[in-house]
Amino acid sequence: MALSADIKNLFGDNSVITRSPSLAEDAAQTLRAMILLEKLPPGTALPERDLATALGVSRTPLREAIRLLASEGLVQYTAARRPFVADPSIAEIKNCLRIQGALEALAGQLACEYATDQELEHIEQLNKQILMASTDGDDRLTAFRTDMDFHCAIVAASGNPQLAEVHAANNARLWRVRFLSSQRTASRQSTRREHENIVASLLARNASQTAIDLRQHLTTAETNIELAITEKKQTQADE
Amino acid sequence: MALSADIKNLFGDNSVITRSPSLAEDAAQTLRAMILLEKLPPGTALPERDLATALGVSRTPLREAIRLLASEGLVQYTAARRPFVADPSIAEIKNCLRIQGALEALAGQLACEYATDQELEHIEQLNKQILMASTDGDDRLTAFRTDMDFHCAIVAASGNPQLAEVHAANNARLWRVRFLSSQRTASRQSTRREHENIVASLLARNASQTAIDLRQHLTTAETNIELAITEKKQTQADE
DNA sequence: TCTGAAATACTGGTATACCAAAATATCGGT
DNA sequence: ACCGATATTTTGGTATACCAGTATTTCAGA
């Protein structure tokens, strides 16, 4: 097998009882990680046979894995039904961020009403972890993952599992560019300030202010991500 | 084949160039219609082999169709991975409606800013069609479909295709109960009033008011749907 | 009659073979 | 050297066979 085992655990192992996953889910997880880490860059063709042999499974589960990633928006199809790694335009990314803004604002409002004190405390703790991790810059992936957890924790605290699902699905499309953005120093600084506001509003259980803070945060993310993308393109053009 | 051909066209044929769909998409469309019209009631087991022979395809595309419906939330899996028609609780339905509220409110705001005059006019026209159709009560399915089109048109007018996708996906879960609710006279009356408000706010391009109106409309839908469900359960219990 | 364990049937998961359409390569004519 | 038509290869779509769990039935024992 070409891939190290831990690439599949990029997002942490949340399954309490580890029911052995099907080969399809397994392959999907591997491919997802490869796409998000740009081992399979945007635009890459994903021929079923080659991937199947590369991952050591047959076409059937591999095909299912690709369909799964397509439903998450990480994979798209050509007119001739050939799958390839999605390459969203900046406009599409902004569209998704607008959606996330609305979803997280709703989640924040609901969390102010329904979250337990423990949940709010957990959110506060995650934010502190982000602050500490970003001070020493050796493992940014951990800090980034904690940032994602922070947002997911807010959504989870809304007490609306369906909202959490939709949010997670939409977030998958944004993971890659968010990771990119998280490596900008300027992005991390604005993020830090805004996280403080969000936590404060949540702890005060001020629903309308939490919604405003989260919307603002996502708007800032729009700017940061756009800058990160243009900076990256600039770097690539210079080579 | 057990099914009439037109059951597959429940949602209208929006594809301009009719690229012949795969058997999987075909089967998915058929199953979707059967679920929404309760020919396959909530909780029904969906054994791959039986369905495949019933629809005249092999397991491979049928299986893919089921996975597709599962990603839409119309199908769920038991712990032993057996698929069955989803049977959402009232709480889950309310959760989805909250999400729709946030999404449509966002869409309304964006539509006020970005929609063309033609798009707004189209929305106004759809609303008039609903009013006319609901006067003569012979074809409620048409009126209901127009109602769905009305909401989709608002989302489409937002100029955010990704938002339209997420909205459509989330709407699939609600279709069945919304159809149920649309058959209540009281529901239709409150809907009628609120639609007027929405159209007025949209035509005035008053973003914040449009958002308020749409949120209100979805809140009302919550109440109406809950009433429709409890009334239906009452009727069933009386038998 | 009831219980529980063994036998049976059934189900989803997987591998594989084959097909038609699409993409690519080949090659003859200009 | 370029172009277009034809031959070849590659691709996704589909059908099918087989396997390992899971559910169901059967039936012996109390």
Image (cartoon, coloured by chain):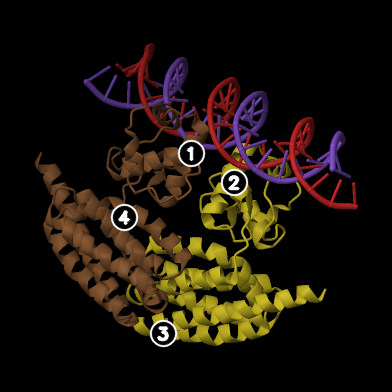
Chain colours: A brown, B yellow, C red, D purple
* Residue A102 coordinates in the image, percent (x, y): 36, 70
Q: Are the residues tagged 3 and 4 within 8 Å (C-beta)? A: no
Q: Is residue A58 visible?
A: yes
Q: Is residue A120 above or below residue A147?
A: below
Left/right placement of residue D24 relative to residue B106 reads right
Label 3 vs label 1: CA separation?
48 Å
Q: Nearer the viewer, mark 3 or mark 4?
A: 4
Label 2 vs label 3: CA separation?
47 Å
Q: Identify which amino acid the numbered label 1 is placed on.
A: Ala
Instruction: Give a yes or no on whether discs 2 and 1 share a subunit.
Output: no
* Nearest to N terminus: mark 4 or mark 1: 1
Q: Is residue B25 visible?
A: no
Q: Crowding at label 1, few (<14), some or many (≥20) Cα neighbours within 10 Å?
A: many
Q: Nearer the viewer, mark 2 or mark 3?
A: 2
Q: Is residue A102 above or below residue B65?
A: below
Label 3 vs label 4: CA separation?
32 Å
Along the line of sight, the residue nearer the viewer: A141 or A99: A141
Q: Which residue is mark 3?
A: B201
Q: Element under label 3?
A: helix
Q: Identify which amino acid the numbered label 2 is placed on.
A: Arg
Q: At 27% from the left edge and 41% from the top edge, which residue is drawn?
A: A38
Q: Which residue is mark 1?
A: A24
Q: Element under label 2?
A: loop
Q: Which subunit holds the residue at mark 2?
A: B
Q: Quadrant of residue A148?
A: bottom left
Q: Identify which amino acid the numbered label 3 is placed on.
A: Ser
* Residue A21 coordinates in the image, percent (x, y): 49, 41
Left/right placement of residue A107 relative to residue A222 reads right
* Residue B113 coordinates in the image, percent (x, y): 32, 75
Tell me, for residue B81, which label it has, or none: 2
